[in-house]
Image (tube, grey):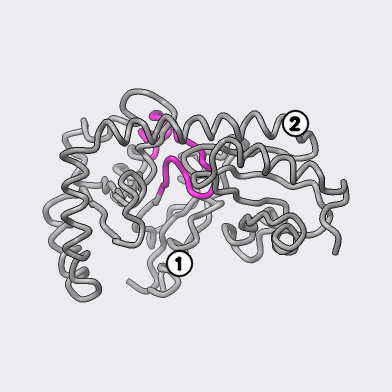
Amino acid sequence: QAGDEIILPTPWYFNHKMFLDMSNVTAVPLAVGAEMVPLASDCAKLITQRTKAIVLVTPNNPTGAEYPAQTLRAFADLAKRHKISLVVDETYRDFDSRTGMPHELFTDPDWPDYFVQLYSFSKAYRLTGHRVGAIVASTALLAQVEKYLDSVAICPSQLGQIAALWGMQNLDDWVATERHEILARRAAMINGFKTLPDWTLLGCGAYFAYVEHPFKAPSDQVAKDLVQQAAVLLLPGTMFHPIQNTQGTRQLRIAFANIDKSEITELFARLAALAPTGPKP
């Protein structure tokens, strides 16, 4: 409700922030470390009587960072101790570069008291636009979620629901192939930035690479110039930070899921061709 607080690591997924703004709920930014992974110990300092939840996205949008299982466990323990919710958005879990379970939070018999898992079928089954997802939570919380959905969207379209169900029943092998291709593109992105010493790769995973650019201009201007002069479309880091945070002016998000390895090679050729001072104003 209005006046509540939700803790979001920054860089954050801006739609989470915008929804909280629309609901008059305060988004409390939690700075991440050098590996783009937040620390539960830092988060603990931000919890107040108004805090209702911590929201994590892993693999992350925009940074691509894959949060270690021990990090998620630490946040779960923190949420449980303070009697608040831990919401983990795992939209990109099908493209995690690691093998095995990404976490073991469901092994805690008390998980319904504090843990909420979010998932989207839009990435794994290419259902973007059909808005089909899943929520795993306690029975009591799901009853409240149903009330909210019934007054907002009612439900996703029947077509999207049927497609998602068919995908779960038939597309495991296809999703595995898609994962292999996305991981190959991730590797190409990581190797590509090794050829651009003036750029810093801050995080890379799922669909995204998050970088620090070398140019004098702020990222919102750099993004415009890259479109006009190199035909490269990136998002400025200012979209993923609070307005007063200047870190975003040095950062850019690259979405590479829709380009193959040859196009990734072309991307780095275009970035390398830019003058050291950046795109011309």
Q: Residues within 10 Å of mark 1 (few under 14, many from 20)?
A: many
At mark 1, the secondary structure is strand
Towards the viewer: 90 or 163: 163
- Does the segment drawn in magenta span residue 61? yes
Query: Which is more foreground, mark 1 or mark 2?
Result: 2
Q: Is 183 left or right of 240, judged from the image as shown?
A: left
Question: Which residue is denoted by mark 2 in the rendering?
Answer: 195
Residue occupying image coordinates x 79% and y 46%: 214
Determine the residue positioned at 61% across, 42% down. Answer: 263
Where is mark 1, residue-wise?
A: 26
Image quarter in which the N terminus is found = bottom left
Q: Position of residue 158 (x, y in %)?
A: 16, 63
Picture residue at 20% right of the left edge, 65% below the top:
157
Q: Residue 267: x percent and y percent? A: 67, 44
Q: In this view, does 13 lie above or below 178?
A: below
What range is drawn magenta here? 56-75
Query: Disc 1 or 2, which lies upstream in sequence?
Result: 1
* Quadrant assignment for the C terminus: bottom right
The one nearer the camera, 236 or 7, is 236
